Amino acid sequence: MPDAQLYVPAFNVMDPEDVRPFVDAVGTAQLVTVGDDGLPDATFLPLLWEGDRLVGHLARANAHWRRVVQDSPALAIVTGPDAYVSPSWYAAKREHGKVVPTWNYSVVHLRGSVRIHDDAEWVRGLVTRLTDRHEEPRDEPWAVTDAPSDYLDKNLRPIVGVELVVESVEAKAKLSQNRSEKDRAGVAEGLRADGREPADLVQP
């Protein structure tokens, strides 16, 4: 896949060691592909990042999976919390007034080739791993094997697997890194006043 010209300002780059934990914590993505007719399709779905692959599943009733061209380029967009940042929160507003609004956010774009897996065993393995991932922290985790086998088979038939072989990763975390310590403290205070949790929205 040819390299694209990506817009990632230096102060917005997510630390490399934070990228996988971020994707794992979010656990979902918008999968974007383009059909033979050149029209894009997008579906929100839970995903696991395993090695160099993102794996998930689509509803069989969703026409998206039938439009996927095997091994064609695809994009998965993983987004974290985001918030409007008012210039009135900055200490700099009171000092010189040279401030403007902005938006804080974190996002990871994973590009690669996509493949559909219409295979019962592949899908069963994926659903088992995906379930284990989200049930593990619970006091009484539910397991796929807790369901009757015939019931499970019935509920696996309506989904198909999807796999994206990751070839490039673009990660941005716009968290007021370019502002002064006083300005960042003001943003945190403003977010709290708006009922937002600042921990994921502004750099300490």
Image: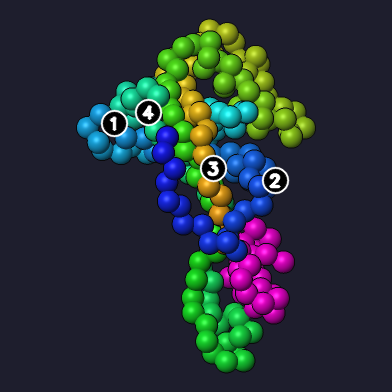
Q: What distance separates the C-alpha of mark 2 from that of mark 4?
A: 28 Å
Residues at badges 1 and 2 in contact (C-beta under 8 Å)?
Answer: no
Query: Which labelled disc corresponds to residue 35?
Result: 1
Report the front residue among 160 and 142.
160
Nearest to N terminus: mark 1 or mark 3: 1
Q: Which segment did they paint magenta?
A: 175-204
Quadrant where the N terminus sits is top left
Q: Which mark is residue 17?
A: 2
Instruction: Say which amino acid is labelled 3.
Output: Val
| Vertical position of residue 109 compared to residue 117: above or below | below
The residue labelled by disc 4 is: 72
The amino acid type of the residue labelled 2 equals Glu
Residue 44: image location, x then y, percent: 44, 39
Q: Residue 88 occupies which quadrant of the picture?
A: bottom right
Name the residue tied to disc 3: 169
N-term-proximal mark, 1 vs 2: 2
The label nearer to you, 4 versus 1, is 4
Which residue is located at x 67 percent, y 77 percent? 180
| Marks 1 and 3 in Cβ contact (< 8 Å) | no
Give left or right: position of 45 versus 36. Answer: right
113 on left or right of 39: right
| 140 drawn magenta | no
Q: Residues within 10 Å of mark 4 (few under 14, many from 20)?
A: some
Task: Judge whether 107 appears above or below 89 on screen.
Answer: above
Q: In this rendered view, identify the residue nearer to me: 99 or 66.
A: 99
Q: Is residue 58 visible?
A: no
Q: Residue 108, labelled with which disc?
A: none
Q: Earlier in the sequence, mark 4 or mark 3?
A: 4
